[in-house]
């Protein structure tokens, strides 16, 4: 069923970065460079300068998050597809806490296609919008059974024909289950690339198209993970931790958040803040703590 995903197959060894060391490094780097950080001038940034800045940000994020990965637990393309559909309007953590029981009850598309809706609704209730999601999951499972031999297809054109599967979900599956490069424009990705002035577009497909012209195709999938990781950990929507951000000198929005290094460090989340991540079964190179199971203290 295609290449196994980062979270479920053995990956090339990546030197794990201790969470506390990464957070300290980010803060120290931001502090050391803070004197060089200035508000953007009135002179418009050229396209070439923006592309160079964007690629440098990507390199900085790769250094900060060498362990970036999809934050949904899964063991095969079908589980990733289901988990991604469930992740709409909820957190990856809540999905990861919900899917063990779901996949135990319905391990294959054939099993899920035959599910009693009311029984599935109870299993996925914690993810919200459970009636609509149940309809999508049963529908996409039936389509996989009837149209694709019970296998998740590895082409975007096929994936988007499945109920409840749009371009964003298809790119998640392609990039992480099949190794097909794709840019995943979720809420975090969209707001950060606009904050960094890589694009002014609001429509996800237009954002995807513009960002695709800035980076080589080989970077698309990991770029998506790095940007989302940064948005969840440091560059928050309401109060970015600017004073603990290693890319502050490259950010035209520097100063919108907390610039004091000590106060900014208190805003760091997940492994950067010494807290559990979102996956119950994170990759081996993840430096943080696994998330707790549903109902665990």
Image: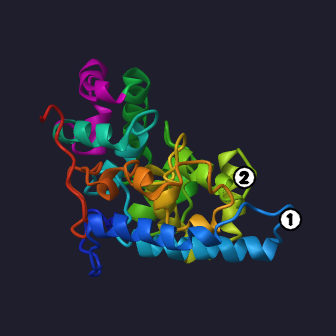
Residue sitting at x 66%, y 59%: 196
- Where does residue 233 sit, x and y in percent of width and height? 41, 53
Residue sitting at x 32%, y 67%: 6
Mark 1 neighbour class, 10 Å CA radius: few under 14, some 14 to 19, many 20 or more: few
Q: Name the residue under label 2.
A: 206
Q: How far apart are marks 1 and 2 (CA)?
A: 22 Å
Q: Name the residue under label 1.
A: 44
The picture quadrant where one finds residue 103 is: top left
Q: Is mark 2 on a helix, strand or loop?
A: helix
Residue sitting at x 37%, y 62%: 69
Is residue 158 left or right of 268 when viewed as pictured? right
Q: What element carries label 1?
A: loop
Q: Nearer the viewer, mark 1 or mark 2?
A: 1
Residue range of the region highlighted in magenta in the rendering: 105-127
- Where does residue 184 sit, x and y in percent of width and height? 54, 55
Residue 207 versus residue 239: which sits nearer the camera? 239
**From this viewpoint, is residue 204 visible?**
yes
Magenta-colored stretch includes residue 128 = no
């Amino acid at each position: 069923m295609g290449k196994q995903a980062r979270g479920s197959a053995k990956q090339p060894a990546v030197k794990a970065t201790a969470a506390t060391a990464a957070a300290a490094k980010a803060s120290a780097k931001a502090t050391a460079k803070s004197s060089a950080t200035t508000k953007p001038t009135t002179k418009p940034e050229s396209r070439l300068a923006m592309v160079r800045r964007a690629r440098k940000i990507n390199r900085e994020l790769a250094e900060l998050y060498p362990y970036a990965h999809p934050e949904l637990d899964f063991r095969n393309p079908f589980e990733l597809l289901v988990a991604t559909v469930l992740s709409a309007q909820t957190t990856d953590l809540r999905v990861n806490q919900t899917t063990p029981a779901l996949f135990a009850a319905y391990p294959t598309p054939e099993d899920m296609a035959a599910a009693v809706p009311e029984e599935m609704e109870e299993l996925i209730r914690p993810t919200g919008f459970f009636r609509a999601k149940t309809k999508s999951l049963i529908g996409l499972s039936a389509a996989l059974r009837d149209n694709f031999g019970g296998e998740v297809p590895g082409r975007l054109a096929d994936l988007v024909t499945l109920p409840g599967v749009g371009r964003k979900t298809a790119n998640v599956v392609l990039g992480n289950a099949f190794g097909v490069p794709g840019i995943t424009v979720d809420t975090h990705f969209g707001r950060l690339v606009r904050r960094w002035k890589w694009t002014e577009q609001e429509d996800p497909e237009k954002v995807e198209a513009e960002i695709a012209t800035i980076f080589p195709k080989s970077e698309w999938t990991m770029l998506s993970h790095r940007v989302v990781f940064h948005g969840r950990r440091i560059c928050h929507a309401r109060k970015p931790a600017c004073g603990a951000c290693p890319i502050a000198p490259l950010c035209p929005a520097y100063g919108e958040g907390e610039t004091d290094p000590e106060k900014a460090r208190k805003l760091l989340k997940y492994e950067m803040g010494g807290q559990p991540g979102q996956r119950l079964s994170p990759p081996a190179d993840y430096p943080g703590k696994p998330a707790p199971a549903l109902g665990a203290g």
